[in-house]
Every structure is written in structure tokens, then in C-alpha cells.
Image (cartoon, rainbow, N blue to C red):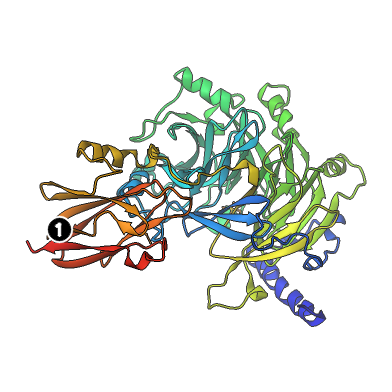
Amino acid sequence: MSDKNDHIKDLGRRHFLRNSAITGVAGASLAGGFGAGAMMGSRPAEAAANNEHHVGPGELDEYYGFWSGGHSGEVRILGIPSMRELLRIPVFNVDSATGWGITNESKRVLGENAPRNGDTHHPKVSYTDARYDGRYCFINDKLNTRVARIRLDIMRADKIVTIPNVQSIHGLTLQRVPRTERVYAAGEMIIPLGNNVQHMDDPSEYWTMMTCLDADTMEIKWQAIVDGNLDNCDTDYSEKYVAASCYNSSRGMTLPEMMGPERDWTVIFNVPAIEQAIANGESTTVGDSAVPVVDAREQAHSGRNPFALYVPTPRSPHGVNTMPPEGKYCVVSGKLSPTCTVIEWSRVDAWFDGSLDDPRDTVVAEPEVGLGPLHTTFDNRGNAYTSLFLDSQVVKWNVEDAIRAYNGDEVNYIRDRIDVHYNIGHIKASLACSRDVDGKYLAALSKFSKDRFLPVGPMHAENDQLIDISGQQMTLIHDGPTYAEPHDALMIRADQLNPSQTYTRDDPYFAETVAMARADGVDLETANTVIRDGNKVRVYMTSVAPNFGLTEFRVKQGDEVTVVVTNLDNIADVSHGFAMVNHGINFEIHPQQTSSATFIADRPGVHWYYCSWFCHALHMEMSGRMLVEPA
Ligand code: CUK
Ligand code: CUA
């Protein structure tokens, strides 16, 4: 498809953002300080010549990819390597196809008055012994300071928690061993403790916190007050630590103030020490919240801080990623510094037990990798891959060689570079956050697509690219346009997920609706009936393709009507929908599922309802009438 002229044109475009970004944001100091390795030329990306990665019609993918949906508020599932989008899981948003945000079952998860939008960044699938166990996916909402848990059997969120005392949850990560019992959520924006108005005008009193949730109950276990804004985070491969990058260590309120320091830090929380202190009653609370809070700020401790280690890290560091398969190192990507900082977890042990004094001695390498390093991922051969936002590249570098170079050896740790299109953010190799890391594919989530796709107006598609990393050189194998704006992705093996084909009748997702029917004396599987309770009317019906159990029901103007539909079809993929015309009601009812929605019948007359999921040759005829008598 491309010829030489296209390539020249491409070079002109790709460097535009890099240069403007350097002068506009990072200042002169950022362009300096390059090692020879970092200057090594890159190959322009070329599509793979053969089609060994092609997944033909009817063939199944090798991996499930979990993609955040960014400000769409959802999580998406892609097949890898085809990059085919398989599913959108609504979480913080309203979704008309599924009725998420419309049904009573989803409103119980969302909360009646909670915001109906979000900004999802970091999907994380639960672990057993640092391997994906396919039970849950956790996701943060940066916009409304929430964390959600998605059940991966039915692909629906079952818990959404608003985190108190902080503003904006950004980083999200999970305990890996022995299994995911804790979820860590990094608070980003700094505010006065308890948002106390007395300190509104005094930024020196602004702080944020790391939050730990119980993964089983989704209750908040504790919070730790910390210096500076928290950004991304990751755990080690023990139960002990969670590390978070911190930008704005100066706690500035404006961009120039935030850009001040040459070094910010990586803060590493000592989880057993925090939980022991709480067990000893050495915690406080903030504001109205009952969550135990410990103080992990430096100034709160005269001697060595028992709760947190602050490792000076250049400069506004961003991604934090523990290296598989053993979890020996943690790589923090420098963003405004052209470096990555490699921390050895065993040295973190040494600092907390007092045998190491200088926090910087936990750093074992600081390779120069290129401009704008944001996130790092890994293969199973000792190599790291770092996304370079300003260079629009992925750089492959060897971790042990970078350590040798840090110790003074003359060794080039850079292995390869590949252009991406354009201005990449997150990056994730197959299984790279788990023991099963296999070094086959790498997803590169590029923030700009510019000329890579047909233009569709001022809002351009983002570009999720797929790179084959199985060989010495990286090969670009796919461009995947995607709707705004995924931040992060992960890939798990197809056999590590075992989603349900139908619902079971005792699924807790609709247990409260079943209990309501029982209280009304209604057997959901047989009854098609209307129960009146004052001006509340509950309409129970079944669905079997192509029929609703009720083809009409009668209510009075002003009634609060709850329609409960139970799908008796028991064949995978035979779903029905219940759509009430002109009432904003539409929801899914999958095989063996019960779904319900409540609305006011505020207009007299005839109102049709219809099945909205194509289910049968007579799908169009699957309908009925709500007859509303005037008040
Ligand atoms: S952040 Cu978006 S590119 Cu929210 Cu993980 Cu780095
Ligand atoms: Cu039932 Cu379409």
C-alpha cells in the first residue's frame, strides 16, 4: 500500500508533535542527555509480509484482550491477534443495548444517584499465584473517583465503590499472590484532608491517599496519606508491596509549579506494616468516613518511615510495571526524563529492614531509552519494551544489560526500536503482568492516528496497533482504529477465561428481583401476571421466542410500573430485549436471565413494547401493548 513518497510524508507528520511537545512542555533540558544507544536509528514500521497472524473467518483468537474504554466509561474485550472487538462491557456509563443504567439490577450496582459516565483507565484481571484466574476484572473511574469489579462469567459489573477522602482514582493494581485479595487504587488529585474548606487557599495542606480494597467484599480496608500526586501503580510478586509513581512532588497548583523538580519519586507502600499498625489501633479517620487511615507522609515520622519508602525518580515518572515471570524488578518510566528507573524489590526489603540507608540504593539501573517514556512491558526473554510518547516509538531494551551499564560496563542495552502511529501511551505484551508471560504479541495504544485511517471529522479514531515481538526485531502486524479513548489493555490466554453461555436461575445479579417476585407470590418461570400495590404496578412476564408471556397489560396514568421479564429460552445466544416505545426503556434478557426496569406511565393511551434483540423469524411480531387509562 505504501510507496517511498508515503514514507517521506509520514516522517514529516510524525515529527510534528514530537517537536512541538518538546518545546511546549518539557523545555530544553529534556532534549539533552542522550546515550549512544538511545540515538540508534529506528526502522519505520512495515506491515508483516506474510499472514501467519491472520485469524480467518470462523477461527478463534488465541487471547482475550481487556481494553479500557477511557471516557466512554466502559471496558472492551478484543480477540488477539485479530483485534476484533468482541464485547463492550458497560460499567460507569448508560448503555441502551444492554439496559445498563436503565434496569433495576444495574442501578443497584451503580447506585441510584451516581453519575452515569466515567473515565476508565486500568483494567486488571484477578490472579491466583500470579496467574490470571479469569474470575474478575477490576477497573478505575478517574472521573468520578470509583472502582468497579466486573464478573467475568457474565461480563457485568457487580460492585461499584466510590472512594472517600480522595479525588480521582488513577492507578489501579492487584495483589498477585497467593491470590487477589487486595485491590490498590491510587488517588491522583491533592485536596485538603476531608476537603476542609479552611484549607482551600493553602495548597501546603493538600494531600492524596493510596486506597486498599478487599477484593472479595469490595469494602475499603484502609487508606494511607502520601506526599505528592499518585499516578500509576503496581505490586510485587509477594503480598508485601505496592509501588506508585508520583508526579508533582512539589505539590504545585499550576503547570510551571508542577514541572519544577528534577526528581519526583516512586513511593512504595509496606502493606504488612500498614495493616499491623491498623490492627494495633494506630490509625485515624478523616471527615465522615470510617475507613482507617495511616499517615505515610515523610514528615509524619521522625525516624525511618515504616509505611512508605520514597525513591527519588526523575522526572514526573508515569508507568510502574513489575517484571515477570519472577517479579524481581519494577520499572518506572520517566515521562519527562528520557530514562526508566529500575528498582529491585529485594532492595526494598533491605531498606525496610534497615540494612539499606539511601532510598536511591534500591535503584539498580536507569537506562536512557528515548523521549517521553510512559509505560513499560516485558517478554519472557529478559527484555523490556517502553512506549515513547514524544518519539512515537516502542523501544526494546534488555534489563540485565541496562543493569550492567549502570554499573559502568560498556554495553548497549537497546535491542530494537519500531515506529508507532502516533504518540503512544500504554503498551502491553501478552501475559506480561503474570508468571505466564510469553513474549508473543504487544499491543501499542497510540493516542493519535492522523493519516492512518479515513478521516471522519474532527474526532479521529485512536490507533491500537499490534506488534509481533516473538523475533529479535519487532514487526507491526495490525492497525486497529478504536473509539475514544482506551488507556490500557492486557491480554490473557483464551483458556484462562471460562465465561457462562447462559445465566443460571440463581444468579445473584438478579436475586433481589427474584426475591421481590417471591414476596408478590409470583413464580417467575410460570407466571404472567400484574400485581397492583397502591400506585405501584409490577408486571411479570416470560419470554420464549417469539412470544412475550403477556401481549397486553393495563395500568393507570401516573402508576409507577415495574416490568419484570424472565427469558425461559435456554439456548446460548437466544436473547430477547424489552423495549417500551417513547419511554426510554430498553434492556437485555439473555437465556435464563431475569431483568426489570421501572418507569412512570405518565401518558394515557396505547403504548407498544417490542423485542429489541433479533431472536426469531417472527422477532418483529414479538410485541405487546401497555394500555394506560387516564387518571
Ligand atoms: S495513564 Cu493514560 S497513557 Cu491513565 Cu495509564 Cu499512561
Ligand atoms: Cu425476542 Cu426478538
Residue 270 image-quadrant placement: top right
- Rendered view: 322 above or below 557: above
- Name the quarter where the C terminus is drawn: bottom left
Q: Residue furthest left?
A: 631
Residue located at (80% from left, 68% from top): 44
Can residue 586 be seen here? Answer: no
Quadrant position of residue 602: bottom left
Q: Is residue 193 left or right of residue 422?
A: left
Q: Secondary structure at mark 1?
A: strand
Identify which residue is drawn at 13% across, 66% down.
604
Residue lying furthest top = 280
In the image, farthest residue toward the right: 410
- Location of the N terminus by quadrant is bottom right
Percent x, y of residue 57 = 65, 63
The image position of residue 31, as x and y in percent, is 75, 61
Is 255 placed left or right of 420 in the picture?
A: left
Q: Quadrant of residue 127 in the image?
A: top right
Give the camera-side residue of 343 and 475: 475
Left or right, residue 540 beside residue 339: left
Number of marks present in the image shown: 1
Residue at numbered disc 1: 554
> What's the amino acid at mark 1?
Arg
Residue extending farthest to the bottom is 5
Is residue 86 shown left or right of residue 3? Answer: left
Is residue 279 visible in the rendered image? The answer is yes
